[in-house]
Image: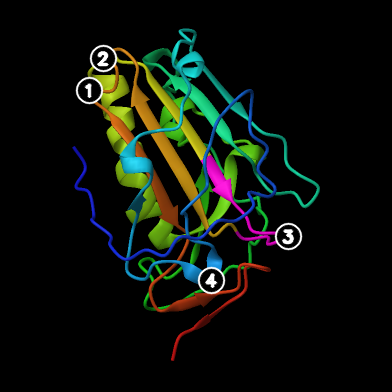
C-alpha cells in the first residue's frame, strides 16, 4: 500500500465546486477540503473522509468497463473524469504528442528549483497508462510536484492492481476550481477495487496543485519565485 501522510490541524474550509459537472448521481463531498488560500504547505496529499471514497452502491455495481469525461465548461476548464478501469482498457501503444494542448491556466515557467525546470505539466485526469486517452477534456494544468509526487504514485498503484492482478478498479478524479479561477488548486482522487470490495485498493485523497518555492496565482495560472 502507498504510504499515507498524516496531516493534523487542517482547518475546515467549505467551498463551491465550480466548473466541475458531476456525472450521473455521483455524491462527491467537498466539505473540509482546503481552498486555494488555505492549501497545506509541504503536503503531497491529504486523506479525505477517512480515506473512504464517495462512490454510491449503485456506482460500485457497474460491471462494464468505461471512462467518461465531463465537457469543458464555459471557461474551457475540465470537469470530473469517471471510470471503471479494466485490463482490456489499457493501451498497447505509447502515448502520442500532447504538446499542442494548452489547458486553462497554462502559463509555463522555468525554474531551477523545479525538477526538470519546467513548472507545469499537462496532467492527465485519468493517466494514459489506464485508457490511452489523451483528449483535451482529460488534461489539466498541474505543477511538476502535483503531477509526479502527488498523482503518479496513486496512478501507478491503480495500474499495477488492474494489470498485474487483473482486477477492476472504480476510479474518479474531480478537479477543483474556485469561482472563475483558471488554474485548479487541486483534485480529489478516489479509487476502489470492486472485485474484493476494496480490500486491495481503497483511497480518497485531496492532492493540492502547488510547487515548493513557487507562488501560484490560481486565478490566471501566473507564478513567481518565493523570495
Earlier in the chain: of badge 2 and badge 3, it is 3
Tag 4 residue: 37
How far is disc 2 from disc 4 in space, using C-alphas?
Answer: 39 Å
Residue lying furthest bottom: 227
Q: Say whether residue 31 is magenta.
A: no
How far is disc 2 from disc 3 in space, using C-alphas?
Answer: 40 Å
Pinpoint residue 168: horizontal percent, then vertical percent.
36, 16
On the image, which quarter does residue 15 sit in? bottom right
Q: Is residue 101 above or below residue 69?
A: below
Is disc 1 in contact with disc 2, using a CB cutoff of under 8 Å? yes
Tag 2 residue: 196
Earlier in the chain: of badge 4 and badge 1, it is 4
Earlier in the chain: of badge 3 and badge 4, it is 4
Q: Say whether residue 182 is magenta.
A: yes
**Residue range (magenta):** 174-183
Q: Residue at x 42, y 13 (%)?
A: 88
* Discs 3/4, front: 4
Earlier in the chain: of badge 2 and badge 4, it is 4
Q: Residue at x 35, y 26 (%)?
A: 192
Pinpoint residue 207: horizontal percent, then vertical percent.
42, 53
How far is disc 1 from disc 2 in space, using C-alphas?
Answer: 6 Å
Where disc 2 sits, the SS reads loop
Q: Answer whether residue 98 is visible to the viewer in this image.
A: no
Tag 3 residue: 180
Q: Is residue 13 above or below residue 72?
A: below
Structure colour scheme? rainbow
How far is disc 3 from disc 4 in space, using C-alphas?
Answer: 15 Å
Q: Is residue 156 above or below residue 44?
A: above
Left or right of 189: which side holds 43? Answer: left
Amino acid at each position: 500500500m502507498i504510504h499515507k501522510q498524516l496531516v493534523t490541524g487542517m482547518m475546515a474550509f467549505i467551498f463551491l465546486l465550480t466548473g466541475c459537472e458531476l456525472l450521473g448521481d455521483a455524491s462527491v463531498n467537498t466539505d473540509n477540503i482546503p481552498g486555494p488560500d488555505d492549501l497545506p504547505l509541504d503536503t503531497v496529499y491529504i486523506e479525505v473522509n477517512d480515506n473512504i471514497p464517495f462512490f454510491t452502491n449503485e456506482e460500485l455495481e457497474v460491471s462494464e468497463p468505461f471512462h467518461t469525461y465531463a465537457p469543458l465548461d464555459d471557461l474551457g476548464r475540465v470537469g470530473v473524469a469517471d471510470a471503471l478501469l479494466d485490463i482490456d482498457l489499457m493501451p498497447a501503444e505509447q502515448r502520442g504528442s500532447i504538446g499542442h494542448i494548452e489547458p486553462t491556466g497554462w502559463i509555463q515557467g522555468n525554474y531551477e528549483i523545479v525538477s526538470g525546470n519546467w513548472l507545469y505539466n499537462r496532467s492527465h485526469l485519468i493517466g494514459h497508462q489506464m485508457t490511452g486517452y489523451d483528449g483535451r477534456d482529460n488534461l489539466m494544468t498541474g505543477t511538476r510536484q502535483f503531477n509526479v509526487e502527488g498523482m503518479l504514485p496513486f496512478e501507478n498503484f491503480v495500474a499495477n492492481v488492474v494489470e498485474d492482478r487483473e482486477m477492476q478498479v472504480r476510479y474518479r478524479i474531480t478537479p477543483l476550481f474556485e469561482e472563475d479561477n483558471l488554474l485548479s488548486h487541486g483534485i480529489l482522487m478516489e479509487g476502489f477495487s470492486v472485485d474484493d470490495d476494496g480490500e486491495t485498493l481503497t483511497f480518497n485523497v485531496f492532492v493540492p496543485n502547488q510547487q515548493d518555492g513557487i507562488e501560484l496565482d490560481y486565478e490566471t495560472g501566473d507564478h513567481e519565485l518565493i523570495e
